[in-house]
Amino acid sequence: MPKWLGVTAGLIVFLVALGWLRWHYSPMREIERSREAVAAVKSWHFHSLRHIAGIPPDTYDVDIVCPLFQHTITSSTRPDGTPLTYEYIKYSGQTYNHVGDQWILNAGTEAQNNANASRTVPIVECTTEPVGADLTSLPYAAMLDGSVRRGEYRTVEDGACRDYNVTVSTPHDPVENEFQFSICINEEDHLPRETRHTLQGASQETVSRYTKWGVLRVPPLPPDIPN
C-alpha cells in the first residue's frame, strides 16, 4: 500500500507540474504577460495606417505620456485629392489645435470647460489600455476570453516580435460575429509592436504599430503651451 501511495503522489505531482508548464508557455499566458507589461509603461508612440472601404487611406500618429499628454497628427486626402492634415495636443484637460505656426486653445463648450477646470482629466488610453483603442485589435480582457494561436517570429519597425492570432466571439456586433486579428509581441519585454486586422469590405489590412515604449519621461510641450 505505501508503494502505491508513493506512485500515486508522484503521478499527481507530475501532472500538476506538466499542467503548470503547459500554461506557463501557452499563448494565452503570453497575452497575460503583455497586459501586465503594458500596464507598467507610461508613454508610447502609436502609428496606424487605416484602410476603410469607400474612403482614402488615412494615418494616425500619436504620442502619449500618461496621464495628461497626447499629441495627435492625422493625415488623409480631400475628395479632390489634396492632402488634409489635422494636428492637436491634449494636455491637462485642455485641447490645443495647431493652426499655421501657432497652438490655439480650443475653448469647447461650457460643460467641457467646467469638467476640465481642475486640469487633471486623464487621457483615455491612460485609464484603459492602448491596445484595443483602434480598429485593429480588442482589449486584453477580450483576448483572454477568446482563443489565441502562436504564430511566427518576424521583424517590424521596432525590432523582432512573434505574432499571436486572436479570435474573439462578438455575437452582438452587427458587422462581425467573430473578430479576428493578430498582435505581434516582443517576447523579451512582452510589449506589443504591431496589430493587424482587415476591416469589413476593405481590400487591405489596417496596421497599427507601437514604438518608443517608456522613452518619453515628460510631455514634449511646444513653447506656446503653458506647462
Image (cartoon, grey):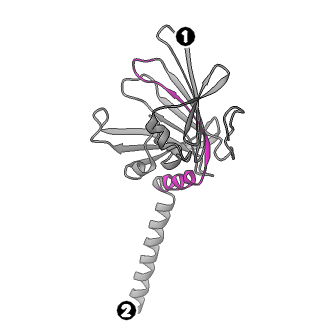
Q: Amino acid at mark 1?
A: Thr
Instruction: Determine whether 100 is above or below 187 in the image.
Output: above
Q: Residue 82's mark?
A: 1
Bin the neighbour count of mark 1 within 10 Å (Cα to Cα): few under 14, some 14-19, many 20 and up: few
Q: Nearer the viewer, residue 226 or 52?
A: 226
Instruction: Give, as a single range, the part of the protein colored magenta.
Output: 29-55
The front one of 123 and 99 is 99
Residue 187 percent across, percent down from the top left: 59, 50
Closer to the eye: label 1 or 2:
1
Where does the image place residue 3, in percent across and percent down from the top left?
42, 89
Residue on which the image places disc 2: 1
- Image quarter where the N terminus lies is bottom left
Asked if residue 60 shows in the view, the reply is yes
Q: Quadrant of residue 62?
A: top right
Image coords of residue 15 (percent x, y): 43, 71
Residue at position x 43%, y 86% in the image: 6
